[in-house]
Image (spheres, rainbow, N blue to C red):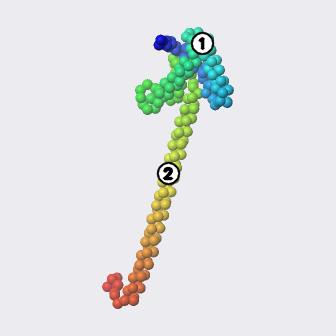
């Protein structure tokens, strides 16, 4: 029949703290680039198994790799949300402006915090560069418009001079008195 999966116990603060610190100590080997599609993945799976064994050796609730991964992802998501709330002015967020896992006034610095801050700096640098490029584009467009107006004025003056010269020739060959001589 349909057997329901029994819900595991909640993570205690000490379990969460030790799990997060263990994960963060192994962050590069867990989340770094693959070193071969199959071997790299197997190495990462082995690291996760080691972390779970270390967590389970402390006693308490027996955890699986999936539970540990899920707890880590949830913690990251919660802290990103808290930081976003601070930036957007929504109540309840991390005052420090950096991502970190907070457990009973004890902060475990997170490697992805630095990456997010680097991305944020890069994004702001990209925005500044785009702004500068847009200013240059506007200056060039303004210069082109000024040049176009100057050329149109010059063309107008040339056409005017040609018409005046043609009028002088017409009036000099006929008995009509030009208007400006009246």
Of 131 and 30, the residue lying toward us: 30
Numbered disc total: 2
Is residue 96 visible in the rendered image? The answer is no
Q: Residue at x 57, y 11 (%)?
A: 62
Residue 14: percent from left, percent from top: 55, 14
Residue lying at the far left in this picture: please name it: 182
Q: Residue at x 53, y 27 (%)?
A: 99
Of 94 and 9, the residue lying toward us: 9
Side of 85 where 117 appears, left or right:
right
Q: Residue at x 55, y 11 (%)?
A: 61
Residue 155: percent from left, percent from top: 45, 71
**Which image quadrant is residue 92 in?**
top left
The nearer-to-camera label among 2 and 1 is: 1
Q: Secondary structure at mark 1?
A: helix
Relative to 6, residue 74 above or below: below
Residue 180: percent from left, percent from top: 34, 82
Residue lying at the far top in this picture: please name it: 59
Residue labelled with disc 2 = 135
Q: Residue at x 47, y 64 (%)?
A: 148
Residue lying at the far front in this picture: please name it: 1
Q: Are marks 2 and 1 in contact (CB under 8 Å)?
A: no
Residue labelled with disc 1 = 56
**Which image quadrant is residue 27 in?**
top right
Q: Secondary structure at mark 2?
A: helix
Q: Which of disc 1 and disc 2 is earlier in sequence?
A: 1
Is residue 48 visible in the rendered image? The answer is yes
**Which image quadrant is residue 153 in?**
bottom left
Q: Quadrant of the C terminus?
A: bottom left
Of 143 and 41, the residue lying toward us: 41
Q: Residues within 10 Å of mark 2 (few under 14, many from 20)?
A: few
């Amino acid at each position: 029949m349909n057997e329901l999966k029994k819900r595991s116990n909640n993570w205690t603060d000490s379990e969460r703290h030790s799990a997060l610190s263990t994960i963060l100590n192994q962050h590069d080997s867990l989340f770094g680039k693959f070193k071969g599609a199959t071997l790299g993945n197997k190495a990462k799976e082995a690291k996760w198994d080691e972390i779970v064994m270390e967590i389970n050796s402390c006693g308490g609730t027996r955890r699986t790799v999936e539970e540990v991964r899920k707890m880590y992802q949830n913690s990251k998501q919660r802290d990103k949300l808290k930081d976003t709330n601070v930036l957007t002015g929504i109540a309840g967020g991390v005052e420090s402006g950096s991502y970190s896992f907070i457990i009973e006034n004890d902060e475990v610095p997170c490697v992805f915090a630095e990456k997010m801050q680097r991305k944020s700096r890069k994004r702001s640098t990209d925005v500044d560069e785009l702004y500068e490029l847009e200013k240059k584009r506007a200056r060039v467009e303004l210069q082109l418009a000024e040049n176009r107006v100057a050329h149109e004025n010059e063309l107008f003056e040339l056409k005017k001079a040609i018409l005046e010269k043609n009028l002088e020739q017409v009036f000099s060959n006929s008995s009509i008195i030009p208007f400006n001589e009246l």
